[in-house]
């Protein structure tokens, strides 16, 4: 009888220990939080400006016409003037988390852009044969992760050694069986009119990663 009592009393303790270890392991596997310029975690639903880390190379990100003023959707572009912060964005994490984490799929949406030309949610557009580039544009769909929305998910990764320096990346993981292009995003400057559009950095071109930081709007 004494042995049975001992066994019954130990089992719940072992179960609690196992749960605690599993929970601790899950927490340890979470990617680090993305930090804003003030060192605070970037939060989903809050408004932030995406600004270039290197000064003298344009301003913040905004929506802009793609050359044809009546063309929709609008392109995600960089303001030419360094003091122009562009439009603030909000993030929506694929896992519904309250904090934006590195290398985690996010919807990105311009805030205050209105409905001038459809949705202000970012998506990777079709290949532009005229300049051999994939551009980021508006017109995306928020939420509903899966193969139908794979072009609408982006993530944020560290850039260099700075604790608050990042780059924007297209490498969605919302579809396990889909073959996707995983590349950094950079600025393509149109040779004719100087328009600065956010584009996928392909292996055979000169577009470099755009180092950025996040400032609370």
Image: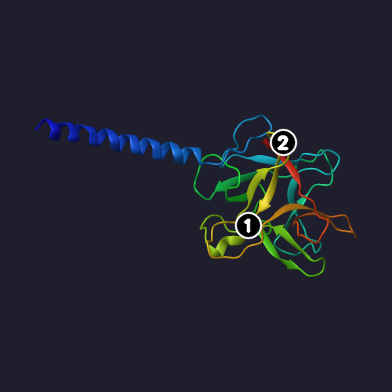
Q: Quadrant of residue 152?
A: bottom right
Q: Residue at x 51, y 58 (%)?
A: 144
Residue 119 circle label: 1
Mark 1 to mark 2: distance in Å?
35 Å
142 sits to left or right of 202: left
Front residue (pair 167, 66): 167
Q: Residue at x 67, y 51 (%)?
A: 169
- Viewer-nearest of labels 1 and 2? 2
19 sits to left or right of 3: right
Looking at the rendered structure, the secondary structure element under dot 2 is loop
Residue 161 circle label: 2
- State the quadrant of the N terminus: top left
Residue 9 circle label: none
Q: Residue at x 61, y 45 (%)?
A: 90
| Res 110 visible | no
- Residue 6, position as x, y percentages in the image: 17, 31
- Residue 49, position as x, y percentages in the image: 69, 40
- Residue 98, position as x, y percentages in the image: 52, 40
């Amino acid at each position: 009888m004494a042995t049975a009592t001992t066994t019954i009393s130990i089992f719940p303790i072992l179960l609690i220990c196992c749960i605690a270890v599993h929970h601790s392991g899950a927490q340890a596997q979470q990617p680090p939080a993305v930090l804003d310029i003030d060192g605070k975690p970037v939060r989903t639903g809050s408004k932030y400006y995406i600004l270039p880390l290197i000064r003298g190379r344009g301003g913040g990100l905004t929506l802009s016409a793609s050359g044809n003023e009546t063309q929709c959707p609008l392109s995600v572009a960089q303001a030419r003037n360094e003091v122009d912060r562009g439009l603030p964005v909000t993030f929506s994490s694929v896992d519904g988390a309250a904090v934006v984490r590195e290398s985690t799929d996010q919807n990105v949406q311009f805030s205050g852009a209105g409905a001038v030309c459809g949705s202000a949610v970012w998506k990777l557009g079709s290949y532009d044969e005229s300049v051999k580039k994939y551009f980021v544009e508006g017109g995306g769909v928020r939420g509903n992760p899966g193969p139908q929305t794979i072009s609408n998910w982006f993530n944020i990764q560290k850039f260099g050694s700075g604790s608050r320096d990042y780059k924007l990346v297209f490498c969605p993981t919302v579809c396990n069986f889909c073959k996707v292009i995983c590349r950094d995003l950079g600025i393509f400057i149109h040779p004719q009119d100087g328009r600065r559009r956010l584009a996928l950095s392909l292996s055979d071109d000169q577009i470099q990663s755009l180092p950025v930081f996040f400032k609370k709007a």
